[in-house]
Structure formats: C-alpha cells, structure tokens
C-alpha cells in the first residue's frame, strides 16, 4: 500500500493554499491519491473560504491518519501556521513555507509519505530568513544526504518532457559550466528515471545544442564539438538511445517531439520556455535522482493574483497525480 502524499504549503502569501484546497475539492474527478498538508491549517481554511470552495480542514496527529481523514476533508499535519495575507509576503510566511517543506520531506524520508509535492515558494523571501539553497530542488537533495548536483529537474507535461543541464545561473556563465561529464551524468539520471518512474522500457533522449543551429559546424560556437558531442558519445557507449545535438529552434516542433521521450537542454530557459508554452496549466516539475518522489507545479507563487480566485489548480492537480503514479511504480506490492 502506498502511503499518502505529503504536500508543502509553499509561500502562504501566494496561490499555493488556493490550489491545494481546490485540488482536494476536485480529488474524485481528478483521480488523486490521498494527500495531506504539512502545516498551515488556518491558511488553508481561509483560502477555501475566500474561494468559496467546499474543503473542510481536518487536523491529524500522524500521517497514518491521512488516508481515512481524506474522505472527510483536507488532512493537515502539524501546528505550524501563520496569518493569511494573500499577495503580501513576509518573514512569518517564509518561515511557514520552510517549515512545511522540511516536514513534508521528513515524512517522505521516514516512509510515512509516498511522495513530496511542493507548492511554490519565493526564493528571495526564503533567503531573507537564512535559506541558503538556490531552490527547493537543491534543498531536497541535501536533505536526502546527496550533493545538490545529484538531483535533476525535469519539467513534464502532456506534450513534452524537458531537462535543463544548468539551472539557476546567469546565461553568461553557462558555457563555462558545461562539461561532457555533467551532460552525461544528467542524461543517465533522466534515462533511469524514465524507465523506473515513467514505465518507458527504452527511453529516447534528444540532446539540444547550445548555440544557434547547434553551432553550424563550429561557425557559431565550439561547445557542440568540444563538449556536447563527446557527452553523446559517452551516452551511446553506455547503451543509451540518444540523438543530437539538435538545433533548439527545431527540437520542439510537433513532428520532432514524436521522436524522443525527453529533451536535454543546456540551460534553464531553453528547457522551460517550450514546456510552459505548450503545457503551462499542466506542467509538472519532477526532481529526479532522489530516493524519494518529489513533484511540484511548474509555476511560481503568483503573488499578483493570490486571493483573487483566479489561480488555476491544473498544474497542482497534475503534480499530485504524477506523484501518486510514480509512488505506485516505486512500490511493487501496490501495483
């Protein structure tokens, strides 16, 4: 049996609470596995009332109670809380976001949660209270006892899966950060995850070039020749099914997307722009390479629309559904 999913509330001034309560309200038609929130009971209740969403909050003392409580309301574990001030981020809210993330992760590491699903946080706000990681992905890796670079961020939607090799760094720094070993190691983690967590027997990877026209034979840059092509050679030697380097302007067309299961991009926007253009309301951020399952909606806190009843829960519902499906695949006795 798969344990309930643990949901971190995200920044309470953002749309996280709204999309969590809406997800519970749509749990049946969306086919969602039981989940519970880590803290923020009054924030969640206030968000439900503001949206006029029928979502009772049920306080629980142990994650094991979540499955039974889920039928009656949104289970909430823990006493951490703060005031609900949509659109007005502050240190109190950041502290709740961090505490919720830590507790949800702890539940997964203890096996009391089948996965962690994280609502959006404001990185700058977390930094104000001492959060030293570039994002939640790196925090989760270290919490699992791994170096931050051991985790890989994949963006997955109905139309596309993409992975950025470099993530939160200046675009000017990307060429100097890329190495053949880095690209190879990221691709290996992706291939293993596609097989284990997505049920793809022989994953096909498409590797994106860095420069326009994938360098045009060296006319527009040498990174393809010196770094990316050697990485592809390493992948092929390891028995991976891989193609590239491909020009980024052609890799995400409908015809091209039929030829691969995931695209490996060289930098953040090269991966995220096509995913968000195609699947913004259903895009899921999946962290690969961890001993626990972690997903998140692929959007931010949206402070500008928080509390206005405009937040679409589609990406959170997709993140919850994907987390549940991966958790089942990782629990053979549950399938």
Image (tube, grey):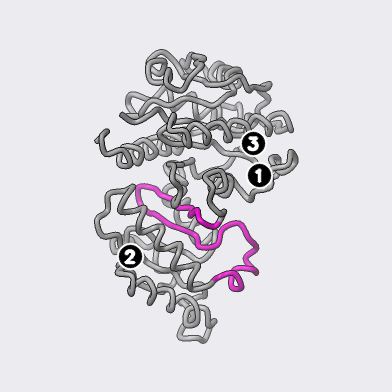
Residue count near mark 1 (Cα–Cα under 10 Å), binned few <14, some 14–19, many ≥20: some
Instruction: Name which residue lies at 40% across and 18% down.
Output: 70
In this rendering, the answer to whether 87 lies above or below 53 is below
What is the C-alpha distance between the residues marked 1 and 2? 34 Å
Residue 36 position in % (x across, y down): 47, 25
In this rendering, the answer to whether 46 lies above or below 154 is above
Residue 205 position in % (x across, y down): 35, 64
Residue count near mark 2 (Cα–Cα under 10 Å), binned few <14, some 14–19, many ≥20: few
Residue closer to the observer: 59 or 109: 109
Residue closer to the observer: 25 or 104: 104
Mark 1 lies on residue: 123
Say the numbered circle drawn on residue 96.
none
Say the numbered circle drawn on residue 256.
2
* 18 magenta-colored: no
Dot in front, 1 or 2: 1
Instruction: Name which residue lies at 47% across and 68% down.
Output: 183
What is the C-alpha distance between the residues marked 2 and 3? 36 Å
| Magenta segment | 149-178
Residue 20 position in % (x across, y down): 49, 28
In this rendering, the answer to whether 180 lies above or below 33 is below
């Amino acid at each position: 049996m798969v344990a309930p999913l643990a949901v971190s509330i995200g920044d309470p001034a953002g749309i996280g609470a709204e999309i969590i309560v809406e997800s519970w309200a749509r749990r049946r038609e969306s086919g969602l596995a039981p989940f519970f929130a880590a803290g923020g009971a009054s924030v969640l209740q206030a968000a439900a009332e503001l949206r006029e969403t029928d979502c009772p909050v049920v306080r629980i003392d142990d994650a094991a109670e979540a499955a039974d409580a889920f039928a009656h309301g949104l289970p909430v574990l823990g006493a951490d809380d703060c005031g609900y001030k949509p659109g007005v981020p502050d240190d109190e809210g950041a502290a709740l976001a961090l505490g919720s993330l830590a507790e949800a992760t702890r539940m997964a590491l203890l096996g009391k949660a089948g996965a962690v699903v994280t609502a959006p946080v404001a990185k700058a706000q977390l930094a104000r209270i001492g959060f030293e990681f570039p994002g939640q992905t790196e925090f989760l890796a270290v919490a699992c006892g791994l170096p931050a670079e051991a985790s890989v961020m994949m963006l997955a939607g109905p139309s596309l899966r993409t992975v950025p090799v470099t993530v939160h760094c200046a675009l000017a720094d990307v060429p100097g950060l890329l190495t053949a070993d880095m690209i190879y190691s990221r691709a290996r983690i992706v291939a293993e995850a596609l097989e284990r967590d997505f049920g793809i027997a022989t994953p096909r990877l498409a590797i994106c070039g860095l420069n326009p026209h994938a360098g045009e034979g060296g006319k527009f840059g040498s990174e393809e020749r010196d770094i990316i092509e050697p990485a592809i050679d390493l992948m092929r030697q390891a028995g991976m099914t891989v193609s590239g380097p491909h020009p980024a302007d052609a890799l995400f067309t409908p015809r091209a997307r039929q030829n691969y299961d995931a695209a490996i991009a060289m930098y953040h926007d090269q991966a995220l722009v096509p995913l968000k253009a195609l699947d913004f309301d259903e895009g899921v951020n999946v962290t690969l390479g961890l001993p626990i399952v972690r997903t998140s909606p692929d959007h931010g806190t949206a402070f500008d629309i928080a509390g206005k009843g405009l937040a679409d829960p589609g990406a959170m519902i997709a993140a919850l559904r994907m987390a549940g499906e991966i958790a089942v695949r990782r629990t053979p006795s549950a399938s």
